[in-house]
Image: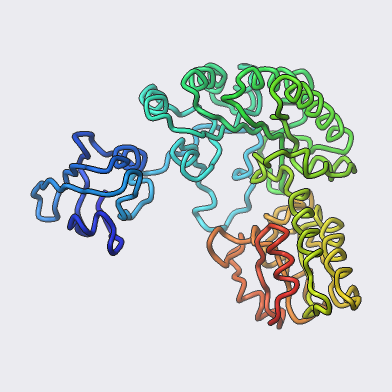
Amino acid sequence: MKICKIEEGSPAARAKLCVGDEIVSIDGHEIHDVIDLKYYTYDAHLRVRVLRPDGREHTVRIRKEEGEELGIEFEDYLMDKARHCANHCVFCFIDQLPKGMRETLYFKDDDVRMSFLMGNYISLTNLTAHDLDRICEMRISPVNVSVHVTDPEARVRMLRNPRAGECLAVMRRLAEYRIQMNCQIVLCPGYNDGVLLEKTLHDLILLFPAVPSVSIVPVGLSDHREGLCPLRPVDAEKAREIIETADRFGEMCLERYGTRVIYCADEFYLKAGLPIPAVDYYEDFPQIENGVGLMASFEDEVREAAAEVPHGAEIVPFSLATGIAAESFMRKMVALLLDSCDNNYECACPVYAVENRFFGSQITVAGLVTGRDLLETLRGKPLGRRVLIPEVMLKYGERVFLDDMTVDDLSAALGVPVIPVKTDGRSFAEAVFASL
């Protein structure tokens, strides 16, 4: 993979590496991908063998701080193609996407490098013996693992891959090398609940401290499941059952290890009609990216921000749009901030729940709301002078919704600015009190 960019003043620039150079080896070690690059460039003194654009090989000596990056970029971040998932999971959400979306949304990655570098979850089913050896040798940690169920037959049935049953054996080997594994269970009623869930949790907590956290999230079911395996959604009764099981094992871990380890996603509490646990329940929020404790953390930050609102603060009237699941919670958060003001702005700051027509009514989370569904919900409504939306509705790092509508498109259609807000309480409070 050829270098496409060199940061000015970086170790690579000082060593006179050039755009178009191809890194062949570092200190005699061949470089095949970004993991090799990061691992073998940690030291302060390096001998880098490069292939010049004219076909000649050249050795460059680099001096830098230990751990400092070279300051180079490649056309592809991995310096290699991402590995495609080899599973056919009964619950795969990508299989449930409607046709006609941008092509990248249909790519199923299952790449340990993306797990280590970007936090993606992997199933371990496409690891080669070389991959496993490299993880152990390089101490590639943490790795995020989509476990779902540890019983071999049940896991093969869920992932529909004959290698799926090897998961626990692979995890035990990684644990021997002290590789940390944050684990996820997508709960599918009839596939991995009941005694199978209990066995899975029992197997995973025996791997502590290599498995420091396990999240349980409910299966997401869209309206686009034609020809797919029939699945039942998690209902209120099932949600309460899962919470009870998770809490029982969590209390066991607290007593044995001093940490809870097992957590349910906030969605379970919403489905069960139960209050979200207090912020202390989630310790250091090890699985907040999976929606575990996100509401507790958000409310704690909003309360802190509300206590700091200056006397006489004013709010530019706004409206807020979110998914159906978070509607009542966000009404409460808005009220907390409005109550910190001298004036009551409640009527000027409505909260709108957006029904998901694009994916289906069973999808109630904000992160899967599309631009067109926002437009349908908000058109003709009192919006104030701006509309706040959670940033998770957008493609990472961009201002584009899942249906390719842009934030600017939506703003123009509604006639008021649409403002994406980071999904933490402090950012939300700052957005509420921001002036246009």
State the residue in front, 314 or 167.
314
State the residue in front, 30 or 47.
47
Snapshot quadrant of residue 149: top right
Name the residue rendered at 70%, 59% in the picture: 369
Name the residue rendered at 68%, 74% in the picture: 418
Give the colouring mode of the picture: rainbow
The reply, left or right, for residue 162 in relation to residue 317 is left
The reply, left or right, for residue 295 in relation to residue 421 is right
The reply, left or right, for residue 95 in relation to residue 390 is left
Name the residue rendered at 54%, 64% in the picture: 398
State the residue in front, 47 or 270.
47
Query: How far from the left and from the top, in percent, is residue 413?
Result: 68, 79
- The answer to whether 6 is drawn above or below residue 65 in the figure is below
- The answer to whether 342 is drawn above or below residue 331 in the figure is below
Query: How far from the left and from the top, in percent, is residue 170?
Result: 50, 20
The reply, left or right, for residue 176 in relation to residue 305 is left
Query: How far from the left and from the top, in percent, is residue 6?
Result: 28, 60
State the residue in front, 310 or 228.
310
Snapshot quadrant of residue 386: bottom right
Q: Quadrant of the C terminus?
A: bottom right
Name the residue rendered at 66%, 31% in the picture: 214
Query: How far from the left and from the top, in percent, is residue 292?
Result: 72, 42
- The answer to whether 432 is drawn above or below residue 109 in the figure is below
